[in-house]
Image (cartoon, grey):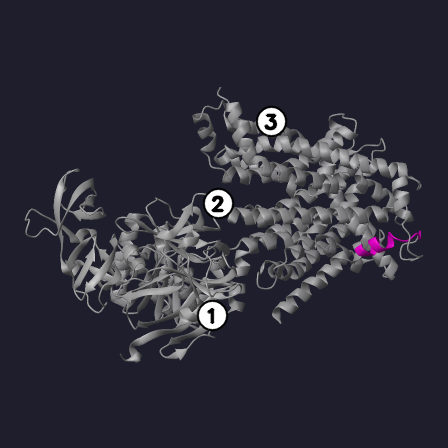
Amino acid sequence: MKLKRSHWSIPYVVFMAIFVVLPLLLILVYAFQDGSGHFTLSNITRFFSDSDALGTFAVSIEVAIENTLICILLGYPAAWILANKDLNRSAVTIILFIMPMWINALMRTLATAELFNTLGITLGKGTLLFGMVYDYLPFMIYPIYNVLNKMDKSYAEAAQDLGATPWQVFWKITVPLSMPGISSGVLMVFMPTVSTFAISEFLTNNKIKLFGTIIQENINSSMWNYGAALAFIMLIIIGISTLFTGDDEREAEGGLI
Amino acid sequence: MASDTHIIDLKHVSKRFGDKLILDDINLYIRKGEFLTLLGPSGCGKTTTLRMIAGFLDPDEGEILLDGKDISGIPPYERPFNTVFQRYALFPHLDVYDNIAFGLKLQKVPEDEIEKRVKRVLKLVSMSDYEDRDVESLSGGQQQRVAIARALVNQPKILLLDEPLAALDLKMRKDMQIELKEMHKKLGITFIYVTHDQEEALTLSDTIVVMNEGKIQQIGTPIDIYNEPVNCFVADFIGESNILKGRMMHDRRVAFIKHEFDCVDEGFGEDVPVDVVVRPEDIYFTTDPAKCQFKATVNSCIFKGVHYEMWVDTDTGYELMIQDYDPYPVGSEVMLYIDPDDIQVMHKERTRNVFDGKMVDETHVEMIGGVFECLPQEGIAAGDDVRVTVRFEHVDLLDHQEDGIVAGEVHFLLYKGDHYHLTILTEDGYHVWVDTNDIWDKGDLVGINILPKDLKIDKKDEAEA
Amino acid sequence: MKKFLAQAYLWILLVLLYAPLFFIGIFSFTESRVLGNWTGFSTKLYANLFSGSMQGSGSLISAVENTLLIAVVSAFVSMMLGTIAAVGIHNLRGRKKQAVSFLNNIPMINPDVITGVSLFLLFVFLHFSQGYLTVILAHISFGTPYVVLSVLPKLRQMNPNIYEAALDLGATPRQALWKVLVPQLRPGMVSGFFLAFTMSLDDFAVTFFTRGTIGLDTLSTYIYTDARKGGLTPELRPLMTLIFLIILILLVIINVRQEKMNKSTSK
C-alpha cells in the first residue's frame, strides 16, 4: 500500500481516539452507571430533583449569559475602534488588549479578588460578574478585532456608494459580516463561564457556586458517577450551543491565531 | 462651449499622499452622456481621480463641480453616482436580489417598485434567473454583471467604473466590452471608466484622458489620440509606434532617420529638434523606385495572425517596426515610403537634462541627491545656486548602484530607432533622462555617473535672463 | 473629537483590565504581609523569592520548574504530532477531512473541566497512576489541535507544486521534505509550539484533575491551594509581576518583528 500523505493523519486520529473520544465516552459510561457498575438513570434523575444542583445550574447559565452579553457590549466597540485605522494607529494598544489572554487566568482572578478585598468591596454576585468580564473580555475582543481587521474595506465603500450613511453601513454591513467573529467570541466566553470552578470560588469567597464547582467537588469526593452525570449534562449544553454557532466558527478560523 | 453640457468639471485639482504628489493640477470636463475613459499605467492617478469624483477622497486643492456646483464636501452616500468596483464588492451575506435592492431599500422605495426595477436591471445584464443565488457561487463574469446591475438600478446620473474587467479572461473581457458599450448607448447616462488597457479605452470611449504621474498627457477622441499623440508618452502608450528623434526643417518638412520627408504639421519653427511618430502599419513597401523614399534590410519577420510584424534596418542605421499583410523574407532589401499624413510631429518636452544645483566648492556641485565633480567655474563661488545642463548622451549608467554617484531605477524606456531614451528615477525622486545604446529593462537598478567635462554650469540668475 | 472619545473609551477599558495587575505589581515592592498595606518601598519580597527563604519556597520553586518542564515537553510533542497531523489532514478530502477536523476541534471547544474530568476517568479506567506522565499526555491532547490550526494555513498558502519541483530537480522524497516542505511550514510550527506552550502554562483545571496525589504541583495548582488557605502568599506578588512583565516584553518583541517582516515583504 503506497504511503500517501493523507495517511499521515492516522497517528493523530489514533491518539485523539484514545485521549479525547474515549474519555468522553467514559463520561457517558460513568454517568449512566451506579457505584457497582450497573446501568442506571439515577444519576440523571438525581440532578433534576436536587434543588441545589438545579439552582447552581440556573445561576451558572444566568451568569454566563450576562457575562457574554456584557463582553459583547463592551468588547465590540473596543474591537471596532482597534480595527479602525482612522481611530487607532497604535499596534501597542492592540497588544495591550490581547496580552491578558496569555497571563494565567487564575493569577488574574486572584489579583482581582485581592483588589476587591483591599477596596473593601464585599465579594458576591457583583464582583463575580465583574471578575468574569475582566477575565473573558479579551477573548471576545480578539476574534471580533481579527474579523473586522481582515474585512474588505470595499464593502463599506460599496454600501456608502449605494446611499448608506455610516450608521447604516455599520448595522447593515459591518455587523452582519462580523458575525463569525462574534460567534467565535461567544464560544470562547459562554461555555468556559459556565464551567469554571476556581474563579467563582475566589471571586465570591465561595458564596456562589458555579456548575464547574459542583462537578469538581463530586469528582474529588469520589462521587464519580454523579460528577460524570453532571459533566454529561454540560456536554449537552455545549452541543446545543455549537449547533447555534457551528458554521460561522469555521469561517472565523484564524480567530484564535 | 456651453458649460451646461458639462456634467462634471475638475478645476486645478491636486492631491497628496504624505509627501508624494499623486495628482498635479488636473483640469478636465466631462460632457453629459458621454463615455469618458481615464487611461494610464498603474500609479498615474486615474483611480484617485475616480474616487474623488465618487466622494471617497477629497482634493487637497481645486474644485470638483457637478452641473456647475461644487460637491467637494458632500459624502459619497449623498452623491447621485454609483460605482462598479474593481473586485465587485458584492455583499456576501446577501443574495443577488438583496444586493441589487440594497440601495433602493435605503431610499425607502416601495417593495413592488423595487421588484420591478430589480427584475428590469437583471434583464439588462442578462442575469434574470439568478435572483436567489448566493453571490459567492457566481463566476467572475456573473459577479461583475450583478455589480453593474446593483449600480444601475439606482438610476445614477453618472456610472463610475474602476477597471471592472481587469479580473476577467480575454474572451469574457471582449464580450463585456461590447455589452458595456451597448448599455451605454441604451441608457444614455454618463460613464466614467478607468483602465490601463489602451485597446479597451480605444474600443469603448467617446473621449480618452491619458494620464501619467499625476498629470494629464492628452485629452481627445480615440482617433485623435491614436493618430496624433502630442508627446512620446502617449505615442508609446497607445498602440505600437516608431518614435524617432527628428528635426523640423520648416513648415511641412521634417528630417528623421537621416532622410527628409514631407509632412502636414506646421508651426514648429525652423530647424527645431522634434520627436516624430510613425505607426508600424503606416510604413509601406513599394517596388516602384520613384515612390521609394528610403531603403532597408529586413531583420526579422513574425506572423501575428492579423498581419506580419517585421523589423528592418534602414540604410542610415535606424531600426523600424513595420506591420504589413504580406511578409518579406529576412535579409531582403526593400524599398519603403511614408505618406505625409502618417507622420506625426511632436514637440520635444526637453532637449537636455536641466538640474537645479548648489556649488559645494570650486570643483564640486551638489544636485539630484549627490555631489558631482565638475571643471573649475569662473565667477561662481561656493554656495551659489546654479543651473546644470547635461546632454542625454552624457549621462553614464552603471550596473551597480554603488558605483555611481547617485542611485536610481529605470522608470521608462523608449526605443528611438537607433538608441534608447530612458527615464531614470533617482532614489530621492529626481528624473534623469539618458540616451544610450545599451539595453536596459524597466525596473533595473542603476548607478548614475557624469563626467566633469559634461556638466555645463550657469549661475541661476544668469540662466534666468 | 471622535478620535478622542474612541481613544478615551479604549484607555478606560485598559485601566480596568490592568488595575488588578498594577495593584499586585505595586504591592510587590513592599514588605507588608497584608495586601493593600503599604509599609514602605522594599524589594525584600523579590529577594525572598529568589533566595528561597520564604516558607514553602521549595515547593513554589518546584512548582515553577514543573510548570516549565511540562509545558516544554508537551508543547514539543504537540508540535511534532500536530505538524504530521496537519499534513495528513491537508491531504484528506470530503467526509474524512470533515470528520478529522471535527475531532481536532473537540478539545478546543470543550471546557477545561470536561477535559480534566474525562481524562481523569480515562486514567482511572486504564489503571494509569497519575503523575507527570498523565499531566503531560493531557497537555498534549489539548495542545496539539492548536498546532494543527497553526500549520494548516501554511499548507494551504504553500504552492502545491514545490514538492514536485524539488523532486524534479533531483531531490529524494526525504530531501524534498526537509529542504522544501519543512521550511515552508516552520513559521506555523513555531507559532503552534508557542500556542501549545502558552496553553499549557495557563492551564489549571486539566492539571488539577490529572496530577494524582503524589504532590505534583504546577504554578496554577500551587496558587490555587495557596489561595484557598487564605490570602495570597506575599512572595507570589513579585512572581506575578515578573511573569506579567516577561509576557509583555515578549509580545512587544514578537509584534515588532512581525511589523518589520511585513514591511520588508511588502517592499
Q: Nearer the viewer, mark 3 or mark 2?
A: 2
Which three-letter amino acid code belongs to the residue tagged 2? Asp
Q: Nearer the viewer, residue C184 or A202?
A: C184
What segment carries the magenta color?
C22-33
Q: Residues within 10 Å of mark 1 (few under 14, many from 20)?
A: many
Q: Nearer the viewer, residue C103 or B76?
A: B76
What is the chain identity of the residue bearing mark 1? Answer: B
Residue B58's disc number = 1
Question: Was residue C215 drawn as part of the magenta stretch in this picture?
Answer: no
Q: Quadrant of residue A114?
A: bottom right
Residue B95 visible somewhere in the drawing: yes
Query: Image height check: is A179 above or below C257?
Result: below
Mark before the other along the chain sequence, 2 or 1: 1
Q: Quadrant of residue C186?
A: top right
**How far, Cα to Cα, is label 2 from label 1?**
43 Å
Residue A153's disc number = none
> In terms of secondary structure, where does tag 1 sit?
loop
The reply, left or right, for residue B301 in relation to residue A67 is left
